[in-house]
Amino acid sequence: MNWQYIWSVLPRFIDATIITLELSFFAIILSILVGVICAVIMSYKIRGLVTLTKCYIELSRNTPLLIQVFFLYFGLSKIGIKLDGFTCAVIGLTFLGGSYMAEAFRAGIESVSKGQIESALSLGLSQKQTFRYVVFPQAFAVATPAIGANCLFLMKETSVVSAIAIAELMFMTKEIIGMDYKTNEALFLLVMFYLVILLPVSIYISYLERRLRRAKYGA
């Protein structure tokens, strides 16, 4: 292991980590937004949108992210729609993540008993207020483990977008291996930086799950 070489390429990996975090941030936020919208459509059976939402979820979950990204980056350019690599990566990750988030939120929404919803409506709350103050907080608590797992999944899936020359961690690793033949050093840095990114997120999600569990059962 050439530690001097590792030290020399460290700034490049830090830059790649920043790009990975940016991709993860936008993908997770947008996926949660898409997931909530799709979950509401399916749970409340909004006419005219349920079938479309189900088709989106099936298409998203049954096609590889790499194919989705290639379609955005290479396919759309053939019809005159040109998007930069970062935008294609965020859209592709959101397209994939949104379907998984939708199923997580749908399970949470459907776990709320009809009795609570009817009680809220009988107290004079509108359907929107009932969803905001009664349904969604409980649905989010139930869905938190799945949401956390999906967040970690999306952060790891950013490695796929190296295929369209996004200089994130995997791209940087392959570039160093290809140019300098420093396989051990590059893989060591890749593992270390992914641990630095993912481990704190995983620990926080576990902490959040415990807090929500205690709040639910009064422990």
Image (tube, rainbow, N blue to C red):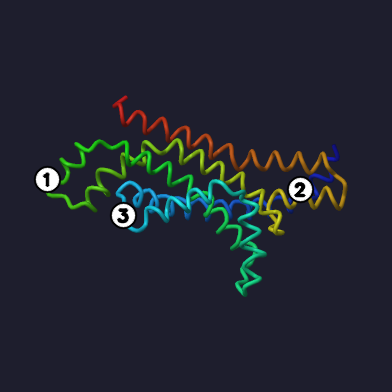
Between discs 3 and 2, the one toward the N terminus: 3
Coordinates of residue 13 in the picture (x, y in percent): 72, 50
Q: Badge 3 is on which residue? A: 46
Disc 3 to disc 1, how far (Cα)?
Answer: 24 Å
Q: Residues within 10 Å of mark 2 (few under 14, many from 20)?
A: many
Is 202 left or right of 174, judged from the image as shown?
A: left
Residue drawn 16% across and 50% down? 125
Q: Is residue 127 positioned above or below 216 on the image?
A: below
Q: Is residue 73 positioned above or below 197 on the image?
A: below
Q: Please report contact status of discs 3 and 2: CB closer than 8 Å, yes or no.
A: no
Q: Amino acid at mark 3?
A: Ile
Q: Residues within 10 Å of mark 3 (few under 14, many from 20)?
A: few
Q: Residues within 10 Å of mark 1 (few under 14, many from 20)?
A: few
View extreme (top): residue: 219
Q: Which label was assigned to residue 173? A: 2
Q: The N terminus appears in which quarter of the rendering?
A: top right
Label 3: which secondary element: loop
Coordinates of residue 137 in the picture (x, y in percent): 31, 42
Q: Badge 1 is on which residue? A: 123
Can you tell which of label 3 and label 2 is closer to the viewer? Answer: 3
